[in-house]
Image: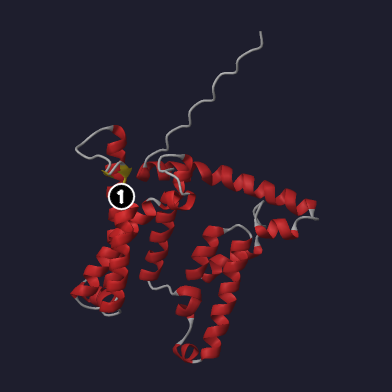
Amino acid sequence: MGHWWYRNIVEPGKLPLLLALAAFVLTFLITRLVTRMIRAGKGPFGNVSAGGVHIHHVVPGVVLTVLGGFGAVASGRYGFGAGAFAVMFGLGAGLVLDEFALILHLDDVYWTEAGRKSTEAVVVTAALVGLVLAGFLPFGVNDMTGQELRDRGGVIVSVAVNFLFSLLALSKGKTRLALFGVIVPLIALVGAVRLARPGSFWATRFYRRRPRARARARLRAYRHDRRWSGPRRRFQDWIAGAPTPPDPPPPRLGRH
């Protein structure tokens, strides 16, 4: 175990990345636990305010991310400083992405349906970093031999082709496939060749005069969402808490 740890984590300089990922995930989970306790009115925790202004935890998160990021760049991939700044960066990133939906909407949507975007951003980020930690490199560079890596032309072509796959997947509304395709190119290829989601740039641009393609795209999106939306929501609610149900609409007053 010690030999594997040194050969795969320490020697390649991946220890700071592992520490940052661990700090990132733990910070998100602990933050969600605290906010759920505050929401339920349990425990000694409470919202932080200064001068009547509610201080969201994205604020210290930004500070920690900036300090940890610049410190990590300055300290390199080895030594105590690299590990310490990596943990600081992971802490800050966890706090920031826990309120990703707030930044996106510029509104306090933490416990609303729109707030699910924060949980999704954290899960996707952790998965992507985990893939990099496991040895995958962006745009399929990890699949190239030493000779191919020394050939700049080959690297440029490989990166350009895989970037095109990810761009096509993104234009078709396959955001997750596009992101994961940056690390594992074949995933982006799947998103690039499949039907676009309704409302995506590709569907709006190329399905406008193709009613059959539009109908097939809507049917496939409906089936996909019906199959995966429920399990994904239950998983998000389990780790981050369920959103607050919206208030019911006021009753209509009948005419007299």
The residue where tag 1 is placed is: 29
Q: Is residue 47 above or below residue 26?
A: above
Which amino acid type is marked by label 1?
Leu
Tell me the quarter of the image containing the N terminus.
Answer: bottom left
Which type of secondary structure does the marked residue at label 1 adopt?
A: helix
* Residue lying at the far front of the rendered structure: 51
The image shows residue 196 at horizontal and vertical percentages of 66, 57
Q: Is residue 131 above or below residue 33?
A: below
Residue 243 in view: yes
**Mark 1 neighbour density, 10 Å: few (under 14) some (14–19) many (20 or more):** some
The image shows residue 2 at horizontal and vertical percentages of 20, 73
* Residue lying at the far right of the rendered structure: 209
The image shows residue 144 at horizontal and vertical percentages of 48, 83
Tell me the quarter of the image containing the C terminus.
Answer: top right
Q: Residue at x 64, y 53 (%)?
A: 197
Q: Quadrant of residue 161?
A: bottom right
Residue 76 in view: no
Q: Residue at x 39, y 73 (%)?
A: 135
Which residue occupies the foreground of this view, 139 or 255? 255
Which residue occupies the foreground of this view, 195 or 7? 195
Which residue occupies the foreground of this view, 220 or 197? 197
The image shows residue 180 at horizontal and vertical percentages of 49, 64
